[in-house]
């Protein structure tokens, strides 16, 4: 049973992750692979709205996606986008990245190899990881402008869409931890963390929402 305080704290982390960027046309959209196929839906909708002429879907598999997406996150994303009417030749697929840092680095290399000039990127991710993705992207590729986008829905609506409340809260806690520790490891730009957000994070950790935490000695990218 998840307590009311835990719901309140999770909402606090959710709100903090929202960057609130105004979406506008960019050179390319990069859809970050995950267990959430809704990222592909959002990216496809943005393409149809004229927000990017080209999409890169990036992602291998992870412990949370390997059963849902056995052919790899980026491959499943591409298939979904094509189903939604995005032309196949408007999609590039990067299938090796296993974390956010690699998502950005490998997508950048792929675009460079294709001779595609990039000045701005529409970064599409899960709603509860906007700030984490943005902080990583700014560190990994500082020469372009980054605009974050995700599915427009409330915390409650998102929980219903995923169907696993504890997984989402664990993910929120993991994303917040990375915002706090990864700047010191050189993996992200530093973000100011409000006291109320840090306290909400610490209460959730104390209540056992810890499955997505990493060791502070871990040296992998976010």
Image (tube, helix red, strand yellow):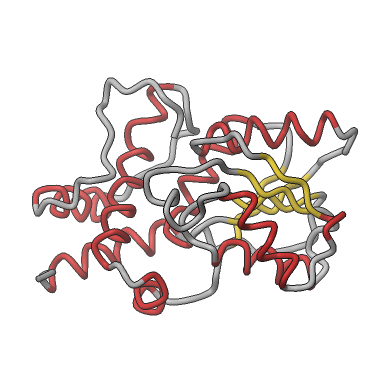
Residue 216 placement: quadrant: top left
Residue 51 placement: quadrant: bottom right
Expressed as whole percent of the image width and height from the top left, the position of residue 128 reads 42, 59
For residue 205, above or below residue 96: below
Going by the image, does 59 lie left or right of 192?
right
For residue 85, above or below residue 192: below
Q: Nearer the viewer, residue 144 or 62?
A: 62
Q: Nearer the viewer, residue 159 or 120?
A: 159
Q: Nearer the viewer, residue 63 or 207?
A: 63
Going by the image, does 168 lie left or right of 62?
left
Which image quarter holds the N terminus? bottom left
Q: Residue at x 16, y 65 (%)?
A: 6
Q: Residue at x 42, y 75 (%)?
A: 161
For residue 102, above or below residue 129: above
Going by the image, does 44 lie left or right of 7?
right
Q: Residue at x 32, y 58 (%)?
A: 13
Going by the image, does 116 lie left or right of 132?
right
Q: Give the tally of numbered discs.
A: 0
Which image quarter holds the C terminus? top left
For residue 111, above or below residue 124: above
Q: Residue at x 71, y 67 (%)?
A: 44
Expressed as whole percent of the image width and height from the top left, the position of residue 100 reads 52, 39
Q: Nearer the viewer, residue 116 or 147?
A: 116
Expressed as whole percent of the image width and height from the top left, the position of residue 156 reads 34, 77
Expressed as whole percent of the image width and height from the top left, the position of residue 4 reads 13, 73
């Amino acid at each position: 049973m998840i307590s009311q305080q835990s719901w309140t704290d999770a909402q606090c982390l959710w709100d903090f992750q929202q960057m609130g960027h105004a979406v506008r046309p960019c050179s390319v959209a990069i859809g970050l692979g995950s267990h959430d196929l809704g990222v592909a839906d959002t990216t496809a909708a943005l393409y149809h709205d004229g927000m990017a002429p080209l999409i890169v879907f990036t992602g291998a598999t992870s412990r949370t996606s390997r059963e849902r997406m056995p052919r790899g996150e980026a491959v499943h994303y591409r298939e979904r986008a094509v189903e939604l009417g995005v032309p196949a030749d408007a999609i590039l697929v990067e299938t090796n990245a296993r974390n956010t840092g690699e998502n950005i680095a490998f997508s950048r290399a792929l675009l460079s190899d294709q001779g595609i000039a990039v000045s701005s990127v529409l970064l599409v991710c899960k709603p509860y990881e906007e700030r984490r993705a943005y902080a990583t992207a700014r560190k990994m590729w500082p020469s372009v402008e980054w605009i974050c986008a995700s599915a427009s829905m409330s915390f409650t609506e998102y929980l219903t869409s995923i169907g696993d409340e504890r997984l989402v809260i664990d993910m929120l806690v993991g994303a917040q931890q990375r915002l706090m520790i990864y700047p010191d490891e050189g993996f992200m730009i530093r973000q100011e963390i409000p006291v109320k957000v840090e306290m909400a994070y610490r209460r959730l950790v104390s209540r056992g929402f810890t499955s997505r935490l990493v060791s502070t000695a871990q040296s992998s990218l976010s």
